[in-house]
Amino acid sequence: MAMVGGGQLARMTHQAAIALGQNLRVLALADDEPAAQVTPNVVIGSHTDLEDLRRVAAGADVLTFDHEHVPTDLLEKLVAEGVNVAPPPQALVHAQDKLVMRRRLEELGAAVPRYAAIQSAADVDAFAARVDGPIVVKAARGGYDGKGVQLARDVGHAREIVEAYLASRVPVLVEERVALRRELSALVARSPFGQGAAWPVVETVQADGICVQVIAPAPELPQESAAAAQQLALRLAAELGVVGVLAVELFETRDGALLVNELAMRPHNSGHWTMDGARTSQFEQHLRAVLDYPLGGTDAVVPVTVMANVLGAAQQPAMTLDERLHHLYARMPDARVHLYGKGERPGRKIGHVNFLGTSADLESPAKLRERAALAADWLAHGQWTDGWDPHG
C-alpha cells in the first residue's frame, strides 16, 4: 500500500503496517523526512506532481494520505486510471476546502458557526453587521496548525486580512468567533464495506492555534453529548463517503451546543492518545479501514489518557534530545514517548508523550495533565518547569 506524505503520521502508520504484514510505500519530499527515515520503500517527489503520484501508487492495493494537500484534479486522474484512492477525492475535498465543507455540512443539517464566502472586502461589512460580534478570517484552502486562520481585532482589521488574501488569489471566508467552553474531537473510522467505529470523544487544548494537549475522554462531557458527537461523526463519514479515519473537530459552546469546526480525513493529532490508551490505535485502524479489513475495538484500556505534544523550543537546548529522554525516563518511567525524528525548530511538533491514568485521575485529571505538560516541556526545553533537581 502507499501513502502520500512522509511526515510523522506516515511514520507512525508505517509502525502499524509492520504488525499487519504490510509494506507501506511513502511519497516524501526528501529522504530525511520522518517516514523516509524508517521505511525502505520511499519515493522522493512532490504531491503536486502527477508522475510522482503515479510512481508511489504503482502496484499498490490502495493510496492514502499523511496530509490533505494533494490537488483534487490529480486524484481524479489517478482514480480514472484505476488507482484505489482512500478516502476518494470527492470525500477528501471536504477536508481540503473549508467553503466546500461548510456548505455540505449545512446541507446535511450539521451545526456550524455562521460564515460567509468573501469576494471583496466590502462583503466583510455585511457579514459583520449580521453577526454583530468578533470575526475569524480563514483561507479556504491550505491551512493547518493555526496557519491560514486569523482572529480579527475589529471589522477594519478583518478587511485588511481579507484584502491580503484576495491579493494573493487565496479564496477566503469569514466566520463568527464562537463563544466556546472548549474544543472537542470526535474520531471515527469507516471502511468501504460501510463498517464504522468510534473512539471516546476527547478534549483538545490549543495554544496559538496548535494543539498542546488532549484528554481522553473529555472530562465532564455529558454522556448524551458524547454519544451525539460520535453519532454525528459516524453519520458524516457515511454521508461524505469517507474511507479511513475521520476527525471531526468540534466547538462546545458555553450553553453545551456542539458546532463542527474542521474535518480531517487521516490519522489526526487528537488521536495520538490511542497509541497507548485504546484497544486499537488510529494508525492501525486507518490501515484496517482503507484495506477493508474488519475494524478493531475502540474502547479505552484505562480510565483516562493524557497526550501532550512536544513542541520545539524558541532556542534549541544544549542537551541532546537523547539525553533529555534519558532524564525523563529516570523521573517518569511510565511516560510513553513517541518521537518523530524531526529537526528542532520553534513551535514544530517533534513528538508527543502519553500518560495513562487511573479512575482517580479521571475524577480529577489536573495532576495527570500537569505531569504530561512537565514531560513535554522537559523534552522540548531541557529544563524542569517545577524546578525539580535529579541530584537534590
Image (tube, grey):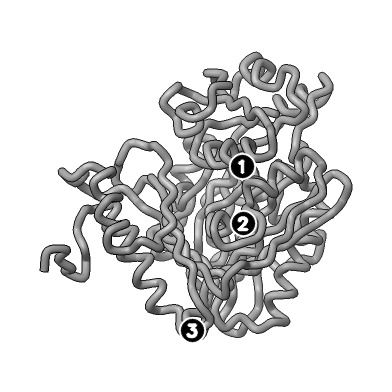
Q: Which mark is residue 16?
A: 1
Q: Amino acid at mark 1?
A: Ala
Of badges 2 and 1, nearer the viewer stands: 1
Q: Earlier in the sequence, mark 2 or mark 3?
A: 2
- Marks 3 and 1, Cα distance to the nearest angstrom? 31 Å
* Callout 2 secondary element: strand
Q: Give the residue pinned by disc 2.
A: 262
Residue at 69 percent of width and 62 percent of height: 298
The C terminus - image quarter:
bottom left
Q: Would residue 253 appear left or right of 103 to someone viewing this image?
A: left
Mark 3, residues whose alpha carbon is within 10 Å: few (<14), some, or many (≥20)? Answer: few
The structure residue drawn at horizontal position 54% and vertical position 39%, both measured from the top left corner, is 170
212 to 351, vertically: above or below = below
- Amino acid type of the residue that numbered disc 3 sits on in the rendered structure: Ala
Q: Residue furthest left?
A: 392
Residue 156 shows up from this direction: no
Mark nearer the viewer, 2 or 3: 3
Quarter of image, res 141: top right
Mark 3 lies on residue: 360
